[in-house]
Image (cartoon, rainbow, N blue to C red):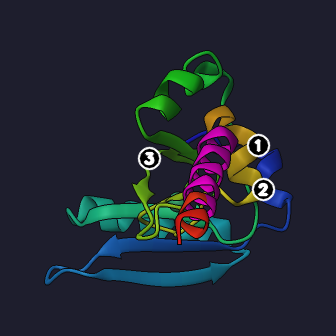
Amino acid sequence: MPLSQNSLNNGARWEVLWVRPKGGWARKAFDQDFSAALRTHNLLLLSGRKGVTLRSCNVGFPLPKRYEKKISRLNARGVYWCPYCITLRRFALDDYKRFMYCPVCDATTGNFHVRQTNPKATVIGYRRTRRVRVRRRVQRRTR
Ligand SMILES: [Zn+2]
């Protein structure tokens, strides 16, 4: 996890998510107590829970340098940097095909920090809205 000591004092509030044994997400909020959140995160990992995620609720974290050259290609394959989960994730398409979103924390490609770290996020959103508008205009004319 790309967390420097500096990034721990930036007012970020933390929560830990994991998948319940019977399915569905469980979450626990830690406010600004990062070390408590990290301890719980590590304990859950040791106990073999699935989907254990330590995430920031309010602060978007930048893309690590090592992904900078790859991120365009990853975006094209549906993989985005989630600045709140602080990891790469395969984003899902929303039901109305308007945007992509993180399946764990629901951050969308309409979010400022998501767009800032994923160069293709804006392009996908723009093309989709344009295509829908053009189709509607055509339907109106034929009526
Ligand atoms: Zn996320």
Residue 123 appears at what percent x and percent y? 66, 39
Magenta span of residues: 121-137
Task: Report, in whole angstroms, how far the alpha carbon at label 2 lies from the one at label 1.
Answer: 6 Å
The N terminus: image quadrant: top right
**Can residue 21 be seen in this snapshot?**
yes
Query: Which residue lies at the image location 76% right of the left edge and 43% below the top edge?
Result: 116
Kindly tell me whether mark 3's CB lies below 8 Å from ligand 1. yes
| Amino acid type of the residue that numbered disc 3 sits on in the rendered structure | Arg
Relative placement, left or right, of 140 versus 74 is right
Residue that carries the numbered disc 2 in the rendered image: 112
Query: Which residue lies at the image location 71% right of the left edge and 60% below the top edge?
Result: 111
For marks 3 and 2 on the same chain, the one whose residue lies earlier in the sequence: 3
- State whether residue 31 is above or below residue 14: below
Relative placement, left or right, of 38 versus 22 is right
Residue that carries the numbered disc 3 in the rendered image: 89
Task: Report, in whole angstroms, how far the alpha carbon at label 3 lies from the one at label 2.
Answer: 17 Å
